[in-house]
Amino acid sequence: MSALTMMSPSEAREMIRNNQWVKPTSGVSNGFIQANLAVLPKDLAFEFLLFCQRNPKSCPIIDVTEPGSGIASLAAPNGDIKTDIPKYRVYRNGELVEEKTDVSDLWDENMVGFLIGCSFTFEEALIKNGIPIRHNEENCNVPMYKTNIQSVKAGRFEGPMVVSMRPMTEKDAIRAVQVTSRFPSVHGAPVHIGNSESIGIKNINEPDFGDRVTIKEGEVPVFWACGVTPQAVAMQVKPEIMITHAPGHMFITDLKNEKFSVL
Amino acid sequence: MSALTMMSPSEAREMIRNNQWVKPTSGVSNGFIQANLAVLPKDLAFEFLLFCQRNPKSCPIIDVTEPGSGIASLAAPNGDIKTDIPKYRVYRNGELVEEKTDVSDLWDENMVGFLIGCSFTFEEALIKNGIPIRHNEENCNVPMYKTNIQSVKAGRFEGPMVVSMRPMTEKDAIRAVQVTSRFPSVHGAPVHIGNSESIGIKNINEPDFGDRVTIKEGEVPVFWACGVTPQAVAMQVKPEIMITHAPGHMFITDLKNEKFSVL
């Protein structure tokens, strides 16, 4: 393992804060939860939190900041979500307007930050159980698809569930259900196994986000609810301002992956 | 089983709505989730939802209404939380001012209803596993205690965790951990087993709420986070208005207990 993998979350966040690490965080501080970020104005916060509560598989909340604060008091009390992500994206009225390495200047008393679980957590559990992760083997991003599974609406927030896909043998698929069921608060069990058309995916080789991966003879595609869902849904509301992490550039928390296992 | 036990949730809610059932709901519509109610004004809703999200063991959210609506669209789409609870309590500035069987006249566009999971769900699972429930045997209410375990604060909401206690053999206690771990969204695994003083309970025979139960020779007390916690915490904020169910008079949902099991 590299020094980076072994770095404590606190050390990693400090490097990131000082712009000494402006790249994806995959593999950084191994064993600790990395989170997606969505920052919204306070007047949308209740509805968005309710949307996440109603759609826990695609929107597993790890922590929420108090309005105006950059501190995720549960996930990283000595971190700051305004500075400790390698790269941010800023959207105005639903349009991407800039990428930044620090969003302190955009912060005001109305900003509420949502940290949302990511699949790195359960992928670590799959790997520990000897289930290979194809997009890691092929050194690309996980394939993601829009589905015909509608999220449960909350106020202005609604839209289809986005899923990520990992191909594996049928035997591994059963074990994958068991392993990921232990993590209900970070996506949990798969939402679908097998025929992709029945959840509205036309062509498994043309993902809507991320990259195509090889599905080998004898393998089935296994689909999990994806943390891209809440960002995609929030974007459709076209908030005056919304800040997210840049893809793959996550917030590293002090929380151990295993802490999120119920068994 | 009585006809009552077998009644569908929809039928039970209709009886309750027509004031044909103004008493506790224990045993009604067996197998379906019954929920605690807390209704708060919209300006407190985000903070309260965040408090629940941060304290999932004591505040397991089953559903939240849209502001001004009485419909819990996930838990009981054809029900109405304004009328379908046998008895409500109305608090103004933290003081109990009246009990009613219908709170439609108190509703306005600012009211947000929170349905919070109750221990009936995991008790059913314990019973199915052959673990006797002492307060059922002794035909009284479960004993509940304030502890020195602090809830995680959210905005104005903070306070100690309230726990419920069930005595059982040490062998059953291990099985109880397994069984209730399957239900992370309705209190989940115990928060403590054994020595009650270490969680700040001075006298196990003097519960703060509910009734004292017998602890037999060779039994250990097993403690679960209790849904009384969020009500107690909300009360301390002294909201202008807050509506709750009267103790034991719960909202009967269409959701099967088993649906809340992750395994």
Image: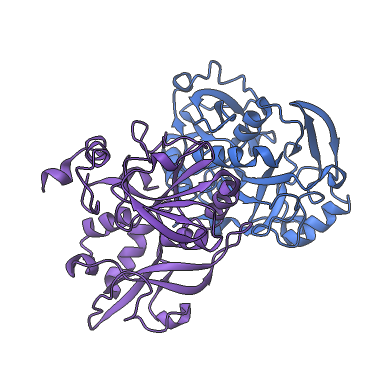
Chain colours: A blue, B purple
Residue A12 percent coordinates (x, y): 78, 57
**Most distant residue in the left direction:** B2
Instruction: Compare residues B181 and B62 and report the one nearer the observer.
Output: B62
Seen in the picture, residue A216 relative to B200 is either above or below; the reply is: above
Residue B242 position, x and y percent, is: 48, 52
Q: How many marks?
A: 0
- Left/right of residue A254 with respect to residue B237 in the rendered view: right
Camera-side residue of B160 and A216: B160
Q: Is residue B21 left or right of residue A200?
A: left
* Nearer-the-camera pick, A251 or B160: B160
| Residue A56 seen | no
What residue is rendered at 53% in x and 15% in y? A202
Expressed as whole percent of the image width and height from the top left, the position of residue A247 reads 73, 36
Query: Between residues B263 and B56, which one lies in front from this camera angle?
Result: B56
- Could you tell whether A136 is left or right of A200 in the image? right
- Residue at image position (42%, 33%) is B73
Q: Tell which residue pokes out farthest to the top in this image.
A: A202
For image coordinates 34% across by 57% down, the residue present is B119
Q: Position of residue A75 (x, y in %)?
A: 66, 57
In terms of image quadrants, where is residue A45? top right
Q: Is residue B259 visible?
A: yes
Q: Is residue B16 above or below residue B216?
A: above
